[in-house]
Image: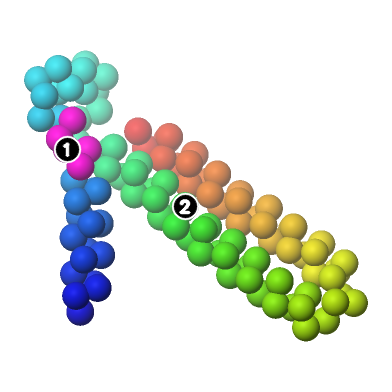
Amino acid sequence: MRKYGTAIFWTLFFMLLPAIAFAAEEAVVVAEAVGRVGGYGIGAGIAVGAAGLGCGIGQGITGGLTTSGIARNPGAAGNMFLYFILAMAFIESIALYGLVVAFSIS
């Protein structure tokens, strides 16, 4: 339970950290001049963070299972490597899509 409390604390801390920048008068004036006052920055940060987290987990699992498969059957390393590179390209495209979504939000 303590682990979850710590994770929730740090998640909220880093989500609310950009709000400190809007505490300054100049930041509010600039944000109003651009027309982006609100939670757009937080939404963009969550989009990039979720995409990066998901892709990092996916790449770790894919790399670990491919390494395990090659260790079990070294003869199939060529075929596994091909699918490994293909899977990594798809996973990385999801991360780039999250970045595009973040730029379109902000």
Q: Residue furthest front?
A: 71
**Residue at screen point 27% across, 43% down:** 42
SS at badge 1: helix
**Residue at mark 2 to residue at mark 1: CA–CA distance:** 22 Å
Amino acid marked by disc 1: Ala
- Does label 2 or label 1 sit earlier along the sequence? 1
Q: Position of residue 85 (x, y in %)?
A: 74, 58
* Residue 45 rendering spot, x and y as whole percentages: 34, 44
Q: Secondary structure at mark 2?
A: helix
Residue 13 coordinates in the image, percent (x, y): 19, 51
Could you tell me which residue is drawn at 9 percent across and 20 percent down?
25
- Residue at far right of view: 75
Residue marked by disc 2: 52
Q: 90 or 101, which is in the foreground?
A: 90
Magenta-drawn stretch, dominant element (helix, strand or loop): helix
Any magenta on residue 20?
yes
- At horizontal 18% and vertical 30% (from top left) the residue drawn is 21
The image quadrant of residue 30 is: top left
Instruction: Give the vertical position of 72 relative to 53 (above or below).
Output: below
- Range of residues picked out in magenta: 17-21
Q: Which residue is mark 1?
A: 19
Q: Indicate which disc residue 77 carries.
A: none
Task: Give the left or right position of residue 53, taking residue 72 as reference.
Answer: left
| Residue 5 visible in the shown view | yes
Up the image or down, 14 lies above or below 28; here it is below
Q: Amino acid at mark 2?
A: Gly
| Camera-nearest residue between 38 and 4 | 4
Marks 2 & 1, CB-CB < 8 Å contact: no
| Quarter placement of the N terminus | bottom left
Q: Where 80 falls versus 15 (above or below)?
A: below
Is 48 magenta? The answer is: no
Q: Is residue 103 left or right of residue 93?
A: left
